[in-house]
Every structure is written in structure tokens, then in C-alpha cells.
Image (spheres, grey):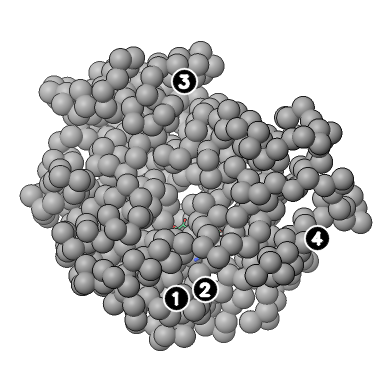
Amino acid sequence: MTIEFTPWPEPMARRYRDLGYWEDKPLSDVLRVSCVKRPSATAIICAHRYFSYTDIDRLSNNLAQSLLARGLKPYDTALVQLPNIAEFYIVFFALIKIGVVPVNALYSHQRLELTAYAQQLHPTLIVASASHPLFSEGSFLEDLKREIPSLQQALIYGENHYADLLEDGLNFPEQIAQLEPTPAGEVAFFQLSGGSTGTPKLIPRTHNDYLYSVRRSAELCGLGPQTRFLCALPAGHNFTLSSPGALGVFDNGGTVITAPDPEPFNCFSLISQHQINMVALVPPAVALWLKAAEAHRDKLATLSLMQVGGANFAESIARRVPEELGCQLQQVFGMAEGLVNYTRLDDDDPLIFCTQGCPMCPDDEVLVVDENCQPVPPGETGMLITRGPYTIRGYYKSGEHNQAAFDAGGFYRTGDLVQRDGNGYLRVVGRQKDQINRGGEKIAAEEVENLLLRHKSISQAALVAMPDDLLGEKSCAFLVSSDPDLRPLVLRKYLRDLGVAQFKLPDKFKFVRSLPLTPIGKTDKKKLRKVLREKAVTSK
Ligand code: J2J
């Protein structure tokens, strides 16, 4: 049995191969090439631990063999949740090498998110860390196994009393079987969608499309053996994994240094200690770094490139990056579904500071259209739709949602409102999808609303974005409740107890008698957002 996904039409697939975008190689090729060229170079520095390319290859082979010995086979799936540690990459490569198809949950995800992914994927294996509250003891795993009968194997990183140790798999001694990834035209792993619907969607990425995205990104960003990349955003996020991210660094024989998060003081120490020259950040982290650099700029001497993406980045802050941090800025506008835009390293300042770049591939088809799907003139605002050699054609097992998310020609409706100049450079000016972008962390409004509506005294709920100086946006829940004594504290605890990730908890609750409606009877979120914007202005 293979993993289902919506394939590209044959003529396009042929074109992508003919043009060399699709190489028909497995994603683990990024490790293979550097093992050949730079076997003893340092691939990963994780706290005090150093791993060469040969180490990563050997450890991932060991784990792969141990998983085969446990009965895992190609096209099985795995649910993985690890923090930013070397083992994240070792597990990723081990699974890819034997054709087991993982999804990497974010470390901030909790019971609800992990369960939703497991319900969709029916994984055979779970890999997680005992440092996460869900896995500090065995009860969640027991529950999950009960609910998902396919889940046979669990490997937990770190001391625990209920499951096998991931560390034992890494030290597995025997070499028995030949390792065989899935074919390059098939699904290598799943990315996570920021989402706008009730259930989080999974994004099937093939070896071919992802490897292209990594290699083209690395070329465009000038990566080489000299690259020393700080991975401070979640390791599994599309940005830090592939734009060009850690995979791009591995492919070029450079070094990835892991940090648990972008907290500036720790990151600045790592930068000076390891001569880091490149980092990828979301805008709120840049703001924190600018503040910290007032006293500690000397620690950033080696930093030459800062990529910023994931959320709206104000021009005024963008301009401060080279001046105050002493490094070049690159804006990145990407999405886990595929399309990635970059400002180029040799672009003029106005493009670097005022745009989010242009598509990386000549065969990225990008249209900016109005409500009738007609292209808008350059400079005007429209909806961004796209297809191309590394943009998916459908979410995993989401027939109905795919009807809405993709048009008849296979274009992905990104839900982003953009303006495009005559040279193809894009500016992200808004959003049409029902999502809150909380400093780069995406919240599907409907998912949180559905959880709130499960509360016995809430009859209506609407989650909308409200402006925030640091995060760009925070979330506000407008609620109609039958209980006049219902308090935000109680609701936050209620949501936490349901098992939802902390970043999805509404930052503010507003109790109202009724929600405003549009002429056709939907909740008028525009009006709610306007109320919040006006309130923000008057309270300043
Ligand atoms: C405004 N909005 C942006 C930007 C993404 C590289 C970089 C980021 C992501 C990512 C990624 C933005 N300015 N510069 O996958 O490979 C918003 C848009 C977009 C959504 C995608 C990558 N960069 N966004 O953020 O899948 O709304 O990917 O559609 O998490 O983030 O979110 P995600």
C-alpha cells in the first residue's frame, strides 16, 4: 500500500523532470552527498554535542535498522514530536531511509493536535521526548494506543519508565537489511498546514518536490561548506527545514547549530561561540534581537545573513536589521504547501526592505486575482493563487476541503492578499483565510471556535485577530454565553484541559449579547476586527 496524494498531471511532471527540477532521488540524498564530500565535517552542534556527517549517517542507519527489526516497513507512518535537538534530524533521516513516512508535530503541540494527526495518519510508530509534559509519564501514550490500534511502537527520548528508549535504537548494532526509501515521486513526509478549518490538515510532500525546494533555496541563498546556521525556530517548520533551512545546510556540507528557541541571550552566546553566520527568524524574534543588540551587538560579529519570514514584517523594522545587527536581511514569504519567495541577496534596498521577494522557480505559476478569478493589474491587491514543481495539489485525505483550496487548474488558493510589481516581487498586504498569524504561529479560527462551542454555556463564538505591537496579531474570542459569571481564567483552563496548544488560547475574551452578521447570515468578522482596531487606536 502506498501513501495517497494528489499527483501533478503527467505533462507537468514530465516537464519538471526534463528541466531538472525533479531529480528522482530520495530526500536523504542531502545527507549522502555531504557524507561523501565532507564525512568528518561537523553537521550538527547540539549544546555540548558535536556530530559529524558520518555520525549522523551511522546513527540514522542504526535507528533505521532497529526500526526494521521491530517490523516497520515502507509506507508505514510515524508521528514524531521532538524539540530542537540533533535527534530530530537523525530520526527524520532514519525514517526517510526506510520509507516510513513521518509527520513532525511542533513541540508546542498538545494532546488535541497529536491525536488529530494520529487519527488521520494511523501511525505505526510514535517518537517523542520525555521532556514534554505529555510524555513525562505513560498515560497519554496508553490513551493514544487505545484509540489508534495501528500504533504498535513507541520510542521515547530521555529517561522514562513506560516505553523503549530512542537512545537504544540509535545504538542498535546490527546491520541486516538493505535500506530502501519510498520512490522519489511518492510521499516522503508530511508537513503541517497552518490551517483555516476545524481539523489540522496534513501536507504530503514528495521526495522530488521537497528536494527541489531545498536545493533551489540553498543555491539562491549562497549556502556552502562555510555556512553555520542557527536553527532557533521549530526544527520541523517548513522555513527552518527547507528554506533552505537545515536540509539546505546539510546538502552543502555546512553546520547546523540548534537552539531551543529564538530567545536572544542564549542565541547571541551561541552565535559568538560557534561563529554562526546565518539565522532564520520570525518578526517578533527580530524585535527582541534588536532590543538585546543594544547592549550585546559585539556577539553578532560573524552573523552575515538574517532571513525573516512567517508573518508580516514592518518596513521600519526591516530597515534596522543591517544597521543595528550588522547583517544582511533576506525576506522570505513561504508556505508549507509549497511556494517560497525570497528577496535576492543582490537586490536593491527598496526590494529587500519593502517586499517579500519573488518566487524561487521560473516555473512557479503565480497569479494575483480578483473575486472573479481575473488577474488584477500590477500594484493592485488581489488573492494569490499558485501551482508549480513544489506546490502540492491536495491535502491528505481532504476531498471536500481540497475542492475549495484548489481550483480546477490545480492552483492552490493561498488565502493571502498580495500586490505584485511589474518584476514579479510580492508584498503581502492581508489575508483572506480565516486564520490568525500570531507572530508566525498560525491559528485556524474555526478549530478554536469549535472547542469553545463545546463549553456548555457558550452558544456562539468567533475568533479574530487583534493588533499587537510585538506579535503583529493576537487572538480575541467574541463569545455569547448564557452564564454571566463565566471568566477568561476559567475558559483558558477549560481549553487547556481539552489539550490544545498554548499558543491557540485566546489572548482576550469579549462577551457580547450577539455576534454581528453579514447580509447572508455569516458572522461578520470584518466588523469584529474593526471594533478591535478602533479600540486599539483609542487606547493608545
Ligand atoms: C507575511 N506573511 C507571511 C511573510 C509566511 C518560509 C517562510 C515562511 C513559511 C511559513 C514557510 C510571510 N510575510 N514573509 O513555510 O518555507 C504567512 C502567509 C502564508 C503563511 C504560511 C517557509 N511568510 N507568511 O510561514 O505554512 O499567510 O509557512 O500563507 O507556517 O504564513 O505559513 P506556514
Q: Does label 3 or label 2 sit earlier along the sequence? A: 3
Q: What type is the residue that disc 1 sits on?
A: Ala
Quadrant of residue 157 in the image?
top left
How far is mark 1 from mark 3, CA to CA?
43 Å
Q: Are marks 1 and 2 in contact (CB under 8 Å)?
A: yes
How far is mark 1 from mark 4, CA to CA?
30 Å
Q: Residue at x 28, y 65 (%)?
A: 278
Q: What type is the residue that disc 4 sits on?
A: Lys
How far is mark 1 from mark 2, CA to CA?
6 Å
Left or right side of 191 for 49: left
Quadrant of the image containing the C terminus: bottom right
Left or right side of 254 for 101: right
Q: Residue at x 46, y 75 (%)?
A: 317
Classify 184 as above or below 340: above
**Residue at the disc numbered 4:** 527
How far is mark 4 from mark 3, CA to CA?
41 Å
How far is mark 4 from mark 2, CA to CA?
24 Å
How far is mark 3 from mark 2, CA to CA?
41 Å
Q: Nearer the viewer, residue 46 or 9?
A: 46
Q: Does label 1 or label 4 sit earlier along the sequence? A: 1
Q: Identify the secondary structure beneath mark 3.
A: helix
**Residue at the disc numbered 3:** 140
**Residue at the disc numbered 1:** 318
Q: Identify the secondary structure beneath mark 4.
A: helix
Tell me the tag on residue 314.
2
Left or right side of 157 for 404: right
Q: Residue at x 66, y 59 (%)?
A: 466
Q: Nearer the viewer, residue 361 or 479?
A: 479
